[in-house]
Amino acid sequence: MSATDGGDLGDFSLADLFRMEVETQTAVMTEHLLALEREPEVARHYEELMRSAHSLKGAAGIVDNKAAARIAHSMEDCFVAAQHGHITLPQERIDLLLDGVDLLSRLSKVAEDDLERWLVTHHREIATFLDSLASSLKVPPGSADPAPQAPAAGEVVSSPPAEPVEIADDRSAVQGNTATGAGRGADAAVRSLRVTAENLNRLLAFAGESVVASRWVNTFASDLLRMKQLQNTISQTVANLRQALAGAGLDERVQAQCMELQRRTGDCLDLLTGQLTDLDLFDRRFYNLSKRLYQEVLDCRMRPFSDGLQGFPRLVRDAARSLGKEVRLDIVGGSTPVDREVLERVEAPLGHLLRNAVDHAIELPADRLQAGKPALGTIRLEARHSAGMLMIEVTDDGRGIDLEMIRSAVVRKNLTTAALAAELSAAELLEFLFLPGFSMKDTVTHLSGRGVGLDVVQAMAKEVGGGARISSNLGSGTQFQLQLPLTLSVLRTLIVEVGGETYAFPLARIAGALKVPRDQIESVEGREHFRFGDQQVGLVTAHQVLGVPDAPAAEAEVPVLVLGDKNSRYGVVIDRFLNERELVVLPLDPRLGKIKDISAAALMPDQSPVLIVDVDDMVRSIELLVSGGRLAHVSRGDATQGRKSRKRVLVVDDSLTVRELVRKLISSKGYVVEVAVDGMDGWNAVRTGNYDLVVTDVDMPRMDGIELVNLIKKDTRLHSLPVMIVSYKDREEDRQRGLEAGADYYLTKGSFHDETLLRALQDLIGEAGA
């Protein structure tokens, strides 16, 4: 049964069908009204407008919505008059007709029970519109038209935001089958079903899991192939054994058994070869079938890019008129398929970009003419697929971005120093535009000036695992490029191992994955760094961030994931890289709440679970560790190797000079020395490290040496760790407090010299070792 027979649309009420009809036809009317401003001589626009108004009038009559029927009838009369050349449609009348479109849209969204009350409340508004439209039909163009005047500069007239219709998930299919007159025969033959978004999401998850599960067959086939190789080796060994026994002069019975054994191993090998061939064929068929199933379900979630852009031409047109500008919006790639969830998330950020382009970028007509440009500015909105990603570009031919103005604003807002700002490249300067609250405008209007638009754009792109970039040529225009995933249900990830567990990091959020030689890890102020491109990147262990057991390896290279943006970038040390894999995202149970550093879960091909890391949350966790001075050391591989032969000493001192002096002095005798910048840093290092001795100063910020000794000696695991206090203030009260706290040795400024310190070291822990 086709949808038009009522089999699939029977669940919808007349009000629901009317609402969908209004949504479809008002979009058509808006499109052609805006087109008439550019092409007033094209007859097709009048025909489409008249047909849409007539369809709405009939639909309103069916649901007994007299107010909507009167509005649609009046608009139809206007379109008929314009079609026959009795009137023209200048901008003022188009504004009035667009008001009628908005009125119809609002009327359709009123619940049946509230309709009477809504009509009483808005009776005057409806009457004013009908009177204005009727009067405009009687007044020749150029006379004093009673139609509402264009909005004053600084004001914005825009249509109310479209409210989603929740009765059917696949609205495009249903809308194509509503009663909108003749000429829809082709659409009427298309079957449509009522499917909720939740059901579709579950179906997509199952289809994705089937794709992942199909890869298990490939793994199993690989194991069988190895078994075949072993079987082949056994068969060859049996053949060699038979030949050797034949030369030994054994009786015929033993030789017959050897021949039987060789024959049976050969049969097993042939059978295994045949099974492998069949399994390989099944693997390819199963994988292709599951991929096709997944793609078909994914296509059900896809919508044309143009579905999310219906209000944009009107937005650009109204915003431009409010500023006295002439702007045309060109949409390219409207048929590009986009995941409906991505399309919903991108709608608001694109609106910000378009408003910014009208307000900031496009010049006034007089200024454009003076610059040798046409008075009409152009904004181009384009969508396309590229390298497995959705690329959306918003390009204008306006004034471009003055980099020197950004440079001055950055310094004025104290975001960096003048010297550093002078060295920033164009790309680095443009990144400041994405900062929250950063605006190049001194005044606030309805359109912009608060500096929130571009921050929203970048936040959305990062949230879905994409990115945003800006490029600009002064005087020629600006381009914003959004790189987004095609779907949010499947994620390309890098699988790693941390503490014996597997974790998945989204590939789009990884700045780099590399192995860093341990001799390239530098320690500055107790924190370890390595060189990544032109940056010094701090190191932190994933074990500490995720709270899993730390088992540092002794390899010469450390596997590191570089996370975060250029302004806040960290190297996260893991145990090892495993592989790259596409995973079907499985949301966590909402009863668990937000799990620190984790965004979702997934299943591996062997059905084992894997946690997907929330990279933004992990970067915030690292920043908290850094600000609290709680970072553990990561380059312990060499120390682990030498733990049995060389003893380790921790030097705690807030003076860089003294700290380095003591470190070099102790290191010269063969000890492995690490440093901490104050008592708190030393306490964190002691708890996470494995030392043979602690050498500490007394006067330090956050935690002094006496408190550090107290904590060490009260800890059941650390109380036997020797502690030496080296004070550069010869105060007896400090000596007394230190010894009472449990210090094993106390050196003062008066008695301290090289031999004394080294002798005390040897007394406490012995020689450094080989």
Image (cartoon, helix red, strand yellow):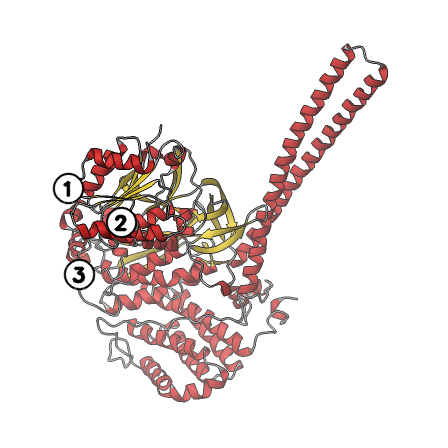
- Judge by depth and name the residue closer to the eye, 373 or 102: 102
Asked whether disc 2 touches disc 3, contact meaning CB atoms under 8 Å apart, the reply is: no
Amino acid tagged 1: Gly
The 10 Å Cα crowd at callout 1, few under 14, some 14 to 19, many 20 or more, is few
For the question of whether residue 705 can be seen, the reply is no
Instruction: Please provide percent x and percent y for residue 184.
Output: 54, 66
Q: Which mark is residue 750?
A: 1
Mark-to-mark CA distance, 1 and 2: 17 Å
Amino acid tagged 2: Leu
Is residue 396 left or right of 617 when viewed as pictured?
left
Instruction: Please provide percent x and percent y for residue 618.
Output: 38, 53
Residue mark closest to the camera, 1 vs 3: 1
Q: Tell me: residue 432, above or below residue 98.
A: above
The 10 Å Cα crowd at callout 3, few under 14, some 14 to 19, many 20 or more, is few
Mark-to-mark CA distance, 2 and 3: 84 Å
Amino acid tagged 3: Ala
Task: Name the residue tied to disc 3.
Answer: 366
Mark-to-mark CA distance, 1 and 3: 82 Å
